[in-house]
Image (cartoon, grey):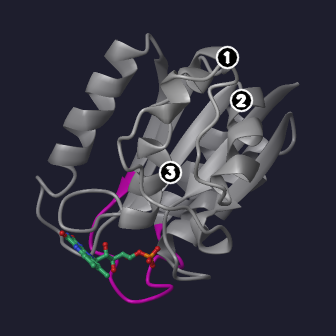
């Protein structure tokens, strides 16, 4: 049984990212161990670039915040799912803080082999996900990870606007066949 960790980057509880992640998790739970990590539940400071984690044997970060709870969860995951709203053509700041805190030798101990991507955006424009997709491809390539699939949902702005959207079924299907 694979372990899947879904990083949900929206602080809006019950919002579109969260509903999309839940649909994926529903599909995946039948044959995987699935954990949703909602950034709203953790206090994670941005990386300050001191590189102290690179100078001690345990790769410890000097910041004693909730990232210490997230590291072991990510370390055990076979598949990490990045779920985020588009904020100014990027992922949310809260999720970016978690990602930047992975700039540590600790990540060399992680089991992860695959990533998946779940994104929501208020706009309908075709290019709204391009900058995130470009970064995603670079991360896959740099870390020799495989893309396990993605669901990209345009035109959902208000909280819960994704309800009834076909994308929820697509996410459930992706989860079930991951
Ligand atoms: C700070 C902020 C920046 C946003 N930037 C964009 C953007 O660049 N493009 C876009 O299409 N939607 C943008 N949105 C809209 C959100 O992506 C959209 O409302 C999404 O459904 C929110 O997801 P959530 O319900 O999971 O929080 C922005 C929303 C916020 C709060």
Picture coordinates of residue 93, whole percent (x, y): 36, 64
Picture coordinates of residue 61, whole percent (x, y): 59, 41
Q: Which residues are magenta?
A: 152-165
Cβ at disc 1 under 8 Å from ligand 1: no
Compared with residue 169, is residue 68 higher up or lower down, i.e. above or below? Answer: above
Picture coordinates of residue 65, whole percent (x, y): 65, 60
Looking at the image, is mark 1 or mark 2 earlier in the sequence? 2
Tag shown at residue 98: 3
Residue at left offset 37%, top offset 64%: 92
Dot 3, crowdedness within 10 Å: few (<14), some or many (≥20)?
A: many
Looking at the image, is mark 1 or mark 3 earlier in the sequence? 3
CA separation in Å, label 1 and label 3: 17 Å
Q: Are marks 1 and 2 in contact (CB under 8 Å)?
A: yes
Compared with residue 89, is residue 75 higher up or lower down, i.e. above or below? Answer: above
Look at the image and tell me in which quarter the C terminus lies: top right
CA separation in Å, label 2 and label 3: 13 Å
Compared with residue 174, is residue 19 higher up or lower down, i.e. above or below? Answer: below
The answer to which image quadrant residue 168 occupies is bottom right
Please give the count of numbered marks on the rendered protein: 3
Tag shown at residue 109: 1
Residue at left offset 35%, top offset 26%: 139
The answer to which image quadrant residue 59 occupies is top right
Q: Is residue 4 magenta?
A: no
Picture coordinates of residue 99, whole percent (x, y): 45, 44
The answer to which image quadrant residue 86 occupies is bottom left
Q: Residue 15 or 74: which is nearer the viewer?
A: 74
Q: Are marks 2 and 3 in contact (CB under 8 Å)?
A: no
**SS state under label 3:** helix
Cβ at disc 3 under 8 Å from ligand 1: no
Residue at left offset 61%, top offset 24%: 106
């Amino acid at each position: 049984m694979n372990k899947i960790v879904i990083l949900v980057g929206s602080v809006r509880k019950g919002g579109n990212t969260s509903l999309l992640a839940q649909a994926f998790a529903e599909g995946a739970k039948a044959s995987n161990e699935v954990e949703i990590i909602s950034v709203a539940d953790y206090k994670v400071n941005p990386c300050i670039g001191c590189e102290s984690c690179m100078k001690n044997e345990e790769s410890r970060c000097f910041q004693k915040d909730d990232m210490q709870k997230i590291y072991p969860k990510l370390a055990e995951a076979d598949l990490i799912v990045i779920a985020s709203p588009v904020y100014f053509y990027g992922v949310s700041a809260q999720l970016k803080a978690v990602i930047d805190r992975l700039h540590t030798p600790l990540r060399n101990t992680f089991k992860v082999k695959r990533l998946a991507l779940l994104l929501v955006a208020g706009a309908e424009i075709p290019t709204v996900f391009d900058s995130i997709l470009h970064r995603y491809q670079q991360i896959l390539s740099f870390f020799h990870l495989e893309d396990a699939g993605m669901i990209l949902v345009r035109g959902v702005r208000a909280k819960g606007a994704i309800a009834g959207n076909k994308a929820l079924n697509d996410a459930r299907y992706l989860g079930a066949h991951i």
